[in-house]
Image (tube, coloured by chain):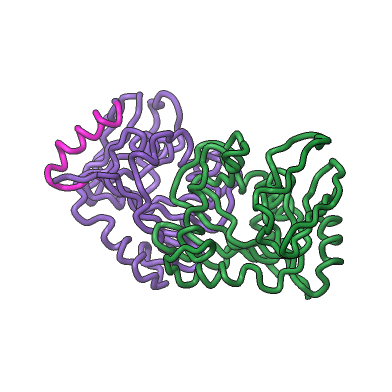
Chain colours: A green, B purple
Amino acid sequence: MSRVRVHGFSISLDGFGTGDYQTLEEPFGHIGQRLHQWMFDAGAFGGTVKYGIVNDMLEHSGHRVGATIMGRNMFGPQRGPWQDDDDWKGWWGDNPPYHHPTFVMTHYPHESIPMEGGTTFHFVQGTPQEVLAIAQETAGDLDICIRGGVHTLRDFFREGLVDEAHIVISPVLAGRGERLWDDLDNFNDLYMVAESIGVGNHTHLRVVRRT
Amino acid sequence: MSRVRVHGFSISLDGFGTGDYQTLEEPFGHIGQRLHQWMFDAGAFGGTVKYGIVNDMLEHSGHRVGATIMGRNMFGPQRGPWQDDDDWKGWWGDNPPYHHPTFVMTHYPHESIPMEGGTTFHFVQGTPQEVLAIAQETAGDLDICIRGGVHTLRDFFREGLVDEAHIVISPVLAGRGERLWDDLDNFNDLYMVAESIGVGNHTHLRVVRRT
């Protein structure tokens, strides 16, 4: 059965998933890459630090995933209607790391963008449930991965749609930006932290939906 | 040399050290005892769960401590001037768990309150540095423990006065209350998370001052 998963979503010690002022140069705002340094240190992008279970988590993050969902702010720094001369194709170069249909949630229609390596960006409008249904139709038995950003993940959490999430707490304060844990009044009823794994000065939480 | 320590200070996953609306019945507001359940489960108050390093931390939390500092809101639910007929002596019964001079930071003068077991509550006014100096004069070579609440701990963090802190992240969202990590712009420069230790679904952080 198709499950909804979140992998390696990084937040600061004070709960921010991005800093403020996203720009072309700084997709995560003032906090920069500090929330994600662990991922570069580990095996994900050729890093060599052996984190044990964390390397396993990274290695398995793409297994059995048939479609990815992300918010438009994660796809790019644009806001509002798309510009006609905009040839933006995401942050990830010609061959994005998804390798399957990737659904970008936006109120503004946009033609699909096929990329190298199997990724095609589709632009869809709708509630989390509606977009999830579209993704699941594509993915079949395979799982769906919710990539972010903060607002998107929070929307899926709030609707009780996430089966399992791997959240990483990086050892820095961001001070401002977008908080992951805000406005989730029903979180304690819907989810539980199944496990906390400390790796060096980082914390890896496994959050699962209560059954 | 006398050091400044924090032991077992609990916050929610979203960073709140207390809920809102502290009352006589609910010293931690709407979040109740959920932030501190780990402490009751462990050996601190006769609990039997063996948490390994956490039991060690609890067991050692009183070692070599010569004085405790807390904010007035941690001492009691009163606000503003003390009432003449107030015979409040703290939340902890006749024999509080401190067993040494305990300095309550408040703008309102109050006579010292000697308790059983070696605890005496002294009421002092001043900056964190000033109150720390008073406590250190009493404690001599022994260490000082900052107990809380949130505002008090944050003030000591901000002034760079804490040598080592054991912060516990409980696996619940509080949603509202007082956040530990707010308004600490200089935190990343002054402190580092030395270690994250996951114990079940709780996270124990060891925060140390950069040297």
Residue B144 spot, x, y in % from top left: 23, 44
The answer to which of B199 and B38 lies nearer the viewer is: B199
Majority secondary structure in the magenta region? helix
Do we see residue B27 in this rendering?
A: no
Q: Give the left or right position of residue A106, taking residue A43 as reference.
A: right
Q: How many marks?
A: 0
Q: Is residue B150 above or below residue A137?
A: above
Please state if B199 lies on the left or on the right of B123 as rendered. right
Residue B157 is one of the magenta-drawn residues: no
Q: Is residue A53 left or right of residue B59?
A: right
* Quadrant assignment, res B61: bottom left
Q: Where residue B37 appears, x then y in whole percent?
A: 48, 60
Q: Nearer the viewer, residue A30 or B111?
A: A30
Q: Residue at x 24, y 46 (%)?
A: B119
Using the rendered view, name the quadrant where residue A114 is placed: bottom right
Q: Quadrant of the C terminus of chain B?
A: top left
The percent position of residue B13, horizontal first and vertical second, equals 54, 52
Q: Is residue A52 visible?
A: yes
At x 50% / y 41%, what residue is drawn?
A174
Q: Vertical placement of A57 versus B142: above or below?
A: below
Judge from the rendering whether residue B140 lies leftward or rightward of residue B95; answer left or right.
left
Point 45% across, 58% down: residue: A202
Task: Kindly identify the residue that appears in the image at 71 percent across and 47 percent down.
Answer: A75
- The residue nearer to you, when weighing B113 against A115, is A115
Residue A50: horizontal and vertical position, in percent?
A: 43, 69
- Magenta part of the chain: B127-144
- Measured along the vertical axis of the image, is residue B23 above or below residue B96? above
